[in-house]
Structures are given as structure tokens and as C-alpha cells.
Image (cartoon, rainbow, N blue to C red):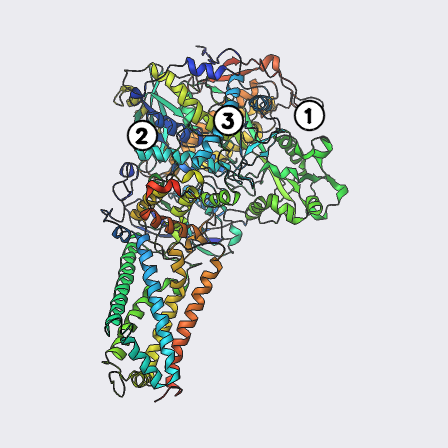
Amino acid sequence: MRVTLKIWRQAGPSAAGSFSTYSVDDVKDEMSFLEVLDVLNERLTEAGEEPVAFDSDCREGICGTCGLMINGQAHGPQRGTATCQLHMRTFKDGDEITVEPWKVASFPIMRDLIVNRAPLDAIVEAGGFISADTGGAPDANLIPIPKPVADAAMDAAACIGCGACVAACPNGAGQLFTSAKLAHLNLLPQGQAQRWDRTERMVETMELFFGSCTNHGECQEACPKEISIDFIALMNRDYVRSKVKNRKLIGQSFP
Amino acid sequence: MTATQEAPGLTKNIDVRPINKPKKPLPFPLSLYQTAVGKKWVMALTGIGIMGFVFAHMIGNLKMYLGAEEYNTYAESLRELLHPIMPKHVVLWVMRFGMIGMFAFHIHSAYTLTLMNRRSKPQRYSRQDYVAANYASRTMRVSGILLAAFLLMHLANLTWGKVLTGKGFVEGEVYANVIHSLEQPLVAALYIVGQLALASHLFHGAWSIFQSLGINNPRYNGLRKGFAYGFTALVCGLNLTFPVAVLAGIVKL
Amino acid sequence: MVLELDSKSPKGDIKDRWDNHRFDMKLVNPNNKRKFDVLVVGTGLAGAAAAASLAQLGYKVKAFTFHDSPRRAHSIAAQGGINAAKNYKNDGDSIYRLFYDTVKGGDFRARESNVYRLAQVSVNIIDQCVAQGVPFAREYGGLLDNRSFGGAQVSRTFYARGQTGQQLLIGAYHALMEQVSKGTVELYTKTELLDVVVKDGVCCGIVTRDLSTGEVRSFNGHAVLLCTGGYSNAFYLSTNAMNCNVTAAWRAHRKGAAFANPCYTQIHPTCIPASDEFQSKLTLMSESLRNDGRIWVPKGFDDNRPADQIPEGERDYYLERKYPAFGNLVPRDVASRNAKTVVDEGRGVGPLKNGVFLDFSDAINRLGEDVVKERYGNLFDMYERITGENPYKVPMRIYPATHYTMGGLWVDYNLMTTIPGLYALGEANFSDHGANRLGASALMQGLADGYFVAPYTIGDYLSKLLGQPPVPVTDPAFAEAEAGLRDEISMWMNVGGTKSVDHYHRELGKIVWDRIGMARDKNGLEKAIAEIPVLREEFRKNVRVLGTPEGINQSLEKVMRVDDFFELAELMARDALHREESCGGHFRVEHQDEEGEAQRDDENFSYVAAWEWKGRGVPQELNKEPLDFEYVHPAKRSYK
């Protein structure tokens, strides 16, 4: 089949961007969307035009490097799928496909379809960890963790940090990412000691970079790991509790 | 140390400038209102207060169907709430100030959060297909502004008796005032539009409260949407009957 | 010069070697640790774990990754799990058994001391990861769950759904980010190592290119750790991520670090076959599928009928036929080679005739669709997403693909390469897996090196440098390396050819796959050694890199990586040619028994082949580190 790609081109972070239109022939159903971009790039190179810069790495939906706005949806029209796992059978012959980078103030566009997602790391840096220096860990089976708790923590920990939640949010909010990172650690017994400090610091760092949540639920739909906005509710509750908690007494109130 | 003060390492390793300025923390509980999550709590709590008012207001207005005497007595009793424990009108004024405060906080938090969202999203996509966001959730600002306008019109119309009063406004003759206003098709239409805006706002807001306050439990999550739909249908549905009933001559002088 | 390959393996009872060695090593006083700069290149499992642990100890660490975030390294894609000799299942596991299984699974080509240490620290890894909040699978009682994995008769594999690598990497990433927040690690993202700086025979720093701005910059340090992964992408199509490359290791090799056993590459039997020429990578599916799926191809050649129209009598369940005892559960290398044989015969299936069927219809009839869905649902979904075929209805198509490389930079027991001050950790080194890696051992090795080995052994080296400041970046050694890199960049920018980098990478991959793939022979390897330099010459004359060296230029990034793959591929062929035996991931068709099984030659080849760089265009020189097996005595692997 043949598709027309309307792609955002931008030479650098401070350059102005605009759309360019390319058509690609011989697209097969089995090709992934990024392979179509590979083909396009190869043809552009041979024609002497600079290839389209886009990020991707593992191409199996786990590293979170890729991420494109495809036809107005983050990671394209298929639910629970990262851009790299989107295949061309989702499209029809003759389709025009609009491809844009994430457009959020705190994800500056570096070139074409590549954005800088460093603020996501900043949120983790603010407290998204359990302090456990190498070597001091007790036996792994010392603390039993109920299976539903471990499963819920795993649901949250499945986040791949692609930024689609922020990109899809009409407000450019970082709530789903931050709440998933928080829930992963706050749900586990090991994470209780730093729970309130962590929550406070991560939420406040998030708010330096991103907008606020108005409960649209777009993030949950865009998430390639289908992470639930229930975690946002947990974060909202934990944040306010972190503000009122007497931290000297938290040893008495472990769940 | 909280992250609103400069988080260590943040500046060195992150080459993206924050869009929101770090704030100097105020004493608790004002510190909560400095953050977006805290503001959403305030918005949700004031939302609950306003929902309570809207619900009580609707219940009171149902007295309309019991005739002029019942209705006017009800209206008068509002001025005498908790009388004789308290002097007349005091409780009513306390409630009025409470309502004004709640509206003020509700609107201010919405306004400042909107500014924050605009900063985060300076550039729109050339095309965005929404999946989960519905009409109601995307138009909260529009329905909110409509509601504020409706509220002013409603106050000017039936509390102060200044505009659109039809055959005349008489202080204390609440039943007659309502009928004189609503028998004008234009006024009735305005009230209907106001109720539709309220329905749209409540439809998203009443569910959103649970999420913002972190009330979330798989055991009852299903009820949250149900509550929002039910509450909206009950309040707005019954409110809509008033202009219709007056126009249809069911409620008359 | 012949390299002195001193493994520095401690002597004595294998159980005490690591403990004794730790005691014998010199320590650095806590107040002195901050005087040492350590550069950690790569932030996968090994890199993130090492950077975090070293910073916790008090060293000044700089961590580098070419990704936009340290959380993206390809460790993240590991699905199955991580081994540890915890014996939580009471099924007879022990450190010694894990050691034994690993040496045997590696076909007796690994260093015993290293493997024993790996098994020893495996238990600490699980403790450490749980303390960090890695959400391993739990049983209903709240204790950790285990599963069994290929090549072992005990259940010792810990897992987090099908995303164990992701969760372990996120644990290490969290530890790293904590140190970044404390200012003890300086993190450089989008920064690619393009040269290693050596002065007076000692490693003193690195030269990098900032992938966002194109800036060439030097960093100095007392020690450099390369945690830069494996080189499966030499095959072009592999299960590795698009950006995985050998450049860091290769450039260290060019500066004098010996490269060991490059021909040991592991082929994973259950991957989704390529669908067209433009396929960019292959996707691996967990080996566990072979527990219930039956592998077959049509008996006849060029059979184009759909699977359901081929009657039972015309199907060849070739693994069950040839290996009645193990059937579809033969080890990875055996399953892979047999798939290649039937496809080469012209009995492959699928539109490109490049796969074999993995059929679940018997399992569905026997167990019911629900049970199959419960066991493999996520894999079936993934398969359907990629191929558009419903594996509940039609058999899956699978084919082997390269996914791990056991070879890498030669390191001693301390993980130091042949350049003093330069270390290699994780998949980048050659040390622990011998000629073949067992499932769920890669994660174990990366974390063992990063958390528990390098942080100790580096202290011993650094303690001798006390009082010596690092070589300043103004030193001519850095200037020379930077100038060399700038020249190289401008050379590539000015080739002005006609073909894309990917074109040549694909062409190289075809040679590597055909000649240095699953089954190798003298003739093919000699052809490869002849063909690769020819293609490389064409590549260097006719590749086209557009744009500028400033700012993001992905073609420029790739061209240098592919250039290094060319040199590596030639060395792989040379190594494979010289190793006149079959062992683990290296199968020479000349060396098999009557039944087609691999024949090792322990008398002549029980050594590590460490190749020494001799300059551009000159073949590397072979050095041998003999392997002694005091505990696990070489025996033939048989799966009949």
C-alpha cells in the first residue's frame, strides 16, 4: 500500500518547525510504523535530503525511547501499544498520516520528532527511590509482601517513562507518570520509611515542569502499559497526607 | 527540605528550565494551596459545598408545587434559620458569605490552574483525537463561566429583582416573582441553558471530586460515576421542571 | 609483544577464593575515596549498579549514557528472570550447583573462579533488589516465587511478570538517581564514548561526543568502567535494541584491550521471523513457549499449503523425531541449529519460507484454550500484534535470532582489561558464561559485576594511585584523541557517497548471519574474511552522511558504529576459523559427531582466545589464557 506522511520537521531546538509531506510506496501490512520511517529515511538519504530524526531503541515496547503523536493520538490509534509496536495493518492504502513530536513546554523539541524528556528524570531524582545502599540488604524473604500488593506495585512499575501520558494530556500534566512512580514504591513495605518525604518532593518537582490534572483520563488511554489513573487518586491522597503527617509517629502507623 | 526549594542536582543534570517558579513555602495549611494537587483538593471540597447548596436549593424549590403559601413560607424561613437561637438573618448571611468564599476559591483555583496548564501546553497539535476526554470534561471552563454568568443573572433577577422581572418584582412575594420571571419565554430559556451548563459541569465535576480527593477503592469505584450521573440527573432534571412547569401553566398564580 | 594474560584468579579452595581475595585487596580510606574520579560508561544493569555503588562508597563518579535517560539501556528488555542460588524451593539448589550448571552450560569455556564468585553473590543480588523495591513475583503467602528455566533442574529463577529486566534496571536506575540527587554522581545523558585515552599504558579518560550538540569533549578519571553491552547488532537483525553497538569496547580494543572469544554468540530459538527486507529488528519470545508448543515443518519441499491443510502424516516434528528424550525442550543451540537445517533444506514456512511452526493446537485440545491463555496469553498477544495472526487459530512461526554475545573484552578476576585502569562489566566482558549462556544468567552477571565485584576490586587498583591527580584533560594524550575523533567525524561527513548507513549495515549483517551464524565452516569463514574488508572499503567510499556534525545527526552516530562492526565482524570470523571445534554458541560443521552433535576439543582448545590489536588492516594477534577445570570436569553434553 501507499501512505502519505505529514511529518513535523524542525532543524533544532530554537528553529521554527513546520510540516513536510512525503509519500511512501510499497508499504506492507507487516511493517511497523517506525520501519516505514526507516524506509523513508533511506530514500531521503539517497535523494540527498536529510533524514527525519526520531528516537527509538528496543522496538519491542519496553525501553520507552520512542514516542510519536500519530494522527492526533500519542503512540497512534492502537490501545496499549508503543509507537514501535504499531504495525501498518492499522492503516489503509492511501491514508494520510500526521506525525508530530510530543508538544509540551517541558519537553523541548530537539530536532524533528525528538524531544528532551529530562524532567521525567528530574522527578525521579527528587525522591523516586528507596534508599538501600549496596550490601546492607536483609534477606529477601524477610518481609512477606501480600501478592495483591506486589501485583499492584508491579502494575505501577510497568511504566516505561515514554512521556505519552504528558503528551496526550490536554493540560500537559505529568500526573500519571509521577503517580505510577510513586505508587510502585509507596505501595511496598520497603518504601514506607521514605513515603511521605518522597511523595512531597516528587509531586512538587513535577509541578515545576508540568500542568495540572483535570481528570480527563486521556493519559490512561495513551499509556502503552495501560497504567490506571487510580494511581493518580492514590498520589492525591498521599500528597495531602504527607503535608499533615507527623513524621515522628509514622513508625506507629505502618499499614 | 522540600523540593520546592532547589532540589539538589536538579539544575546541574537537567537542562530543561522549569515552567513554574519554585515557591517559598507558606505555613501549613496555606502551603497546600500553593500546589496544584492542593488546589485540586480545594476545588473538590468547595465543589462538594456548592453541590450541597445546589441540592438544598433544588429541594426547597420543589415547594413551588405545593402552592404560593408553602413556597413563600419556606423562603421566609430561610431568613429565620436557627432563630431564635440566633438573631434573624445572621445564619443566612453566614451561609451567603460561606457560599461567596467557596465560589471565590473554586474560581480562583480553576483560574490559576488554567494558567499553569497553558504554560505547560503553549503549542497545540495540528490534530488531536481525544479518546477518554468527553465534551463535559473538556468544556469545564466554558460551562463554569456560563454558570457564573447564570448565577449573576439569577441573583439580579430573583434576589435583587433588578432585571428581567416581567410584570414586576415585589420583595417577599417569592412565588409571584418566580412566575412573573419564568413566564417570559426568554427568561425560561436562559434558566434552561443555565441548567444544561450545570448538568455538564456536574457530570464531570461530581466524578472528578473523588479522583482529586484520592477516594479510590476497587470495591466502590463503580459507584463513583453512578453517583455523578445520578446526582446530575436528579438536581438538573428537577430544576428543569420549574421553568417548564411555569411555561406550561402547571404552576400559576 | 605477546600479552601477559594473568587472570589473577586466587588460589586455594574455590569456596574461599573470593573471600580471601577481598581480604588481600588493599582498601581506600573513606576520606580518600572522594579524591578518586571514576568514569562509568553505560547505565544498564552493570553500569547503573556500579555507578551507584561506587558513589555510595564515596568515589566521585561520572556516569555516561548515549540514551536520553539512564533507564533505557537494553537490559530493560530481558523478559524471563534472574537466577540466584537461594534454594527457597528446597529443591537441592546451592551455590555450588549454580556454579556447576553455569560452567557446564557454558560448555567448559569459562573461568571457574569467576563463575563461582558469580554464584556466590547471586544471593546478595536478590536481597539487594528486594530492598530497593523491585516487585518480584510473590506467592499468596507473600514470599518470593521462583520458576524453572532452561538448562537447570531446580527452580531458582526470580521474575517480575515478563519484565524482569525492566524491573531490575529500574531498581538500579533509582539507586543511581539517588546518588545523582546527592551530587555524588554527575550524570551525562546523550553522551557517547568514542575513544578511550591511554597514557603511558594506563587508561586515564575518555573522549565523548554530545549527541544533542555534537560537542567533542574529554573526561579524565583514575579508572574507566565500560558497561556497554554486547555486539549482537553485528548481525544487523538481532533481538538487540537499534542502538546497541560495540563501539566503546571496540575503541578500547584498538587502544590495547584484548578482545576475547568474539565468535561466541548465542542464538535464541524462539523469535518472530523477519517479514520483509526492511525489518529493523527481531522480537524474542520467551523460551517457555516450547514447554507446550510442538515444532514442525512440512515433510515435502516447497509446500505452500496453509498449516491446517497439511495432514498429520505430512508433518515433520523434527525435534521430537531426532531427540526423543528432550523433544521440543532441547537446549537453545540445538533447537536453533535444527531450525536452520530444515529452513536451508527449503522446508521453511511463512511467506518468506524463513520460519518453522510452533503449534499449540495439541496443547489447546489437551488443556483447553483458557489454560493456554493463562500461561502464554501475553506472548500470544505480542505475537498477534506483530504478525497479525492469531496463534490460537494458526500455528506460530518462529526462527532463531542472535540475542546475546558471550565474547567481549578480556578481563581478569578483578574485571580489569589488559589496559590498567580500564574495566569491563556485564555483557561487555567475556568472563562468566563461557561459550554459551544459560537462561536468566545475563541479568545476574550484570548486577553481580556492578553491585558486588567492581566496587571492591577497583579499590585495590585505586589505592595504589593515592596522591596522584588524574591526568588533566589538557594533556597531549587527550588532545591527540580529540583531534583523532574530529578527523574521523569530518572524514565521514565528507565521504559524499550515495548509499545510507543502514544499507551497508544490512549487507554486513547478511554476511555475518550466513557465514558466522548458527553453523560455521572453514570455507564460509574464509569467504567472510575475504568479503568483509571488500564491503567495508565500499562502505568507506560510498556511504552518505548528510547534515552537519553539530546538533543531532543520527546518520553520523550510526556510521561510526557500523564501521566498528565491520572490524569486529572480521575478527569474529577469524576467531571462529581458528577455533577448530564446536562448543556452545560456536558450531563448526566440521566438528560434529555422526548424530550432528557438537564436538568439543578440550585437548587443543580449552583456552580463552584473547585477540590483540595490531593496527588498522593488520590481523589481530592471538593470545591464549589456558583454562583449568579443577572442580567441574569437562564432559560431553547430550540431550538424546
Give me the chain letter of mark 2.
C
Q: Is residue C611 left or right of residue B58?
A: right
Q: Is residue B202 above or below residue A217?
A: below
Kindly report the distance in space between the C-alpha atoms of the residues bearing marks 2 and 3.
27 Å
Give me the chain letter of mark 3.
C
Out of C92 and C394, give the one closest to the viewer: C92
Q: Residue, x 75% and y 45% (percent of image)?
A: C311
Dot 3 amino acid type? Ser
Task: Select label 3 or label 1 by which is in front.
Answer: 3
Q: Residue furthest right?
A: C313
x and y, in percent, of residue C346 in the image = 67, 37
Kindly report the distance in space between the C-alpha atoms of the residues bearing marks 3 and 1.
35 Å
The quarter holding residue C512 reads top right
Q: Secondary structure at mark 3?
A: helix
x and y, in percent, of residue C351 in the image = 62, 44
* Residues packed near mark 1 inside 10 Å, few (<14), some (14 to 19) or many (20 plus): few
Residue C596 is labelled as: 1
Kindly report the distance in space between the C-alpha atoms of the residues bearing marks 2 and 1.
55 Å
x and y, in percent, of residue A121 in the image = 35, 40
Q: Residue, x 35% and y 21% (percent of image)?
A: C223
Q: Earlier in the sequence, mark 2 or mark 1?
A: 2
Q: Secondary structure at mark 1?
A: loop
Disc 3 designates what residue? C122
Asked if badges 3 and 1 are on one and the same chain, I answer: yes
* Residues packed near mark 3 inside 10 Å, few (<14), some (14 to 19) or many (20 plus): many
Disc 2 designates what residue? C184
Out of B222 and C213, give the one closest to the viewer: B222
Q: Secondary structure at mark 2?
A: loop
Asked if badges 2 and 1 are on one and the same chain, I answer: yes
The quarter holding residue C27 reads top left
x and y, in percent, of residue C314 in the image = 75, 41
